[in-house]
Amino acid sequence: MSARLLLVEDESSIADAVQYALRAEGFETEIAATGEQALERIADSEYDAVVLDLMLPGISGLEVCRRVRQTNVVPILILTARTAEVDVVLGLEAGADDYVQKPFSMPELISRVRAILRRRKLDREHGAGVRRVGGIELDLGRHTVMVDGRPVDLTLSELKLLALLTDEPERAFSRRQLMERLWDSPHVGDQRACDAHITNLRRKIERNPARPERIVTVRGVGYKLAVV
């Protein structure tokens, strides 16, 4: 069964070209031209991934991402202008899993979509098991996280990143190592996305995100998960 995608793009020429390319690769692809349409479709149907342009009329792509993340863990790939780096950070903070900057090539976009879908498939197939590291309890089968006894909602990327860190507590990982393992690929794109995911994780699992005790920066290397 082919993956079902929702493409949210208001420029019809771009939407038609991307839909054609995705369908040519075997993806069942629907188009929503506004944020309102996207929210309605996601509420009424189940998708394997959402490709979301941030510049939309009416409800912005960022707001769509935030609202979707309140109730849905569907993977989200955002599209953003190459000159708007702040949008990348805001998109990842809103719960997006990855991004592609415009102008992009179709092979690049398709590669990122395949990576998101591959990650979701691997998570479903190999996600069983409960891990406990300090005050963190991670149920990979149910995709749930408890921190100091309270439930915490994570995006799929945040959950995957935390799973990697809990797999080897106290080991220091470089940003590239984390992104390679996160995407199961040597092609990791902009490694600054790793910092954004780490910042989001800290905001959710640290007692004081401004003074992190769990996800610790290892100077000159990257990050590690401390047992606290």
Image: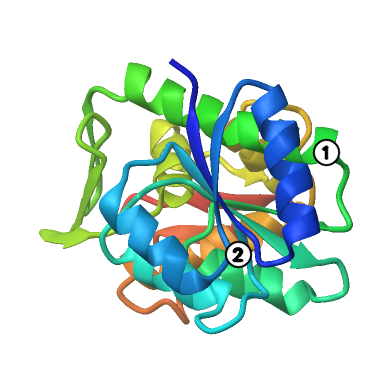
Number of numbered tags placed on the structure image: 2
Locate residue 93, reporting x and y percent: 52, 70
Crowding at dot 2, Cα within 10 Å, few <14 / some 14-19 / many 20+, comes out as some
Q: Tell me if 165 is positioned left or right of 150 in this view.
A: right
Distance from label 1 to label 2 (Cα)? 25 Å
Q: Tell me if 212 is positioned left or right of 96 in this view.
A: left
Name the foreground residue: 19 vs 67: 19
The structure residue drawn at horizontal position 47% and vertical position 77%, both measured from the top left corner, is 63
Name the foreground residue: 213 vs 27: 27
Q: Circle 2 is placed at which residue position?
A: 196
The structure residue drawn at horizontal position 58% and vertical position 64%, both measured from the top left corner, is 33
The structure residue drawn at horizontal position 69% and vertical position 22%, both measured from the top left corner, is 25
Q: Is residue 42 above or below residue 128?
A: below
Q: Quadrant of residue 43?
A: bottom left
Q: Give the residue type that dot 2 points to.
A: Ala
Locate residue 126, reporting x and y percent: 35, 18
Report the colour scheme: rainbow
Q: Circle 1 is placed at which residue position?
A: 106
Name the foreground residue: 226 vs 88: 88
The structure residue drawn at horizontal position 35% and vertical position 63%, both measured from the top left corner, is 40
Question: Quadrant where the N terminus lies?
Answer: top left
Crowding at dot 1, Cα within 10 Å, few <14 / some 14-19 / many 20+, comes out as few
Q: Tell me if 132 is positioned left or right of 164 in this view.
A: left
> Could one spot residue 154 in this view of the protein?
no
Locate residue 170, reporting x and y percent: 47, 43
Q: Is residue 143 above or below residue 54?
A: above
> Could one spot residue 19 in this view of the protein?
yes
Query: Residue lying farthest left?
Result: 149
Earlier in the chain: of badge 1 and badge 2, it is: 1
Locate residue 177, reporting x and y percent: 68, 37
